[in-house]
Image (spheres, helix red, strand yellow):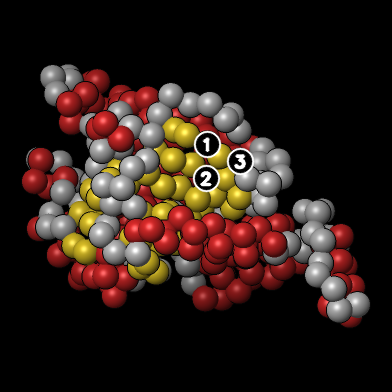
Amino acid sequence: MHDEYQTLAIERRDDGVVVVMLDRPEAANAMNTQMGLDLMHLFEGLLIESADLRCVILSGRGDKAFCAGGDLKERRGMSDAQWQSQHAVFERMARALIGCPLPVIAAVNGAAYGGGCEIAAAADFVYASSSARFALTEVTLGIMPGAGGTQLLPRAVGERRAKEIILTGLPFTAQEAAEWGLVNRVVAARDLMAASIATAQRIAQNAPIAVRQAKQSIHRGMQMSLWDGLAFEIEAYNRLVPTADRQEGVAAFNEKRNPVFQGR
């Protein structure tokens, strides 16, 4: 994973947590083509090589917007072919984010509209500031969600609520998002990053292979029947039995000390 991108600010911490900031505050962190390419490159890179990283926090620069969605100023005047070419980047970015082997926490610090809401929904879970707002406004622009919104939102909030959100295009609050199942936790804006980091650190302290296997088992199993999911789960479980981390975890418990996991 590179540390320098045109539209992202990357902070690698010593605790295995990496903070990724959408960094176009002058445009409410709206996603232009370059941001789509940067996010695609970053998350596809994590699919291949995540080194010593154990958890990702994804947030937005500033205190007003997480991501205002697609950059409509850049899109103005695009031909159909140009629009579809750009959107192919966004589609690939969304798939890379959903497929990231590391846990991803979206720390939604402000408006998460359109593609910004889809990015939040693609994370493993969401913490939001009390002032955050969410919306999928695409139908008000003559389009529809196309970066996972029609698939991810119903899985989080249920089909009927998702239809209401998507077909009206109306915004909703962080508290409503929490009540409906899109957001895990709502905190004061000043506490958002600290709360996100605390949870990421907790995840990072656990056995990294176990965390990744558990994430995969939950995510894949949700797409299967119960019996197929149980079969997938035990295959993921069996991958952990011969690991050094499994031996270390049991040894640390019996020796009454904190385990030191190596990801092996």
Q: Are marks 3 and 1 in contact (CB under 8 Å)?
A: yes
Along the viewing direction, whichever of 103 and 79 lies nearer the viewer: 103
Is 200 positioned to the left or the right of 70 in the image? right
In the picture of the structure, the residue carrying the numbered disc 2 is 19
The residue located at (70%, 64%) in the rendering is 206
* Disc 3 element: strand
Q: Are marks 2 and 1 in contact (CB under 8 Å)?
A: yes
Q: Are marks 3 and 2 in contact (CB under 8 Å)?
A: no
Q: Amino acid at mark 2?
A: Val
Residue 207 appears in view: yes
The residue located at (56%, 70%) in the rendering is 229
How far apart marks 3 and 2 lie (CA) works out to 7 Å
Please tell me which of labels 3 and 2 falls first in the chain: 3
Q: Residues within 10 Å of mark 3 (few under 14, many from 20)?
A: few
Q: Amino acid at mark 3?
A: Arg
Q: Amino acid at mark 1?
A: Ile
Among the 4 quarters of the image, the one containing residue 210: bottom right
Residue 7, compared with residue 144, is above or below; it is above
In the picture of the structure, the residue carrying the numbered disc 3 is 12
Residue 71 screen position, x and y as percent? 23, 32
Query: What numbered label is drawn on residue 42?
Result: none
* Disc 1 element: strand
Residue 218 screen position, x and y as percent? 54, 66
How far apart marks 2 and 1 lie (CA) works out to 6 Å
Among the 4 quarters of the image, the one containing residue 87: top left
The residue located at (20%, 70%) in the rendering is 160
In the picture of the structure, the residue carrying the numbered disc 1 is 10
Residue 168, compared with residue 148, is above or below; it is below
The residue located at (85%, 73%) in the rendering is 257
Along the viewing direction, whichever of 112 and 152 lies nearer the viewer: 112
Residue 57 screen position, x and y as percent? 50, 50
Q: Residues within 10 Å of mark 1 (few under 14, many from 20)?
A: some
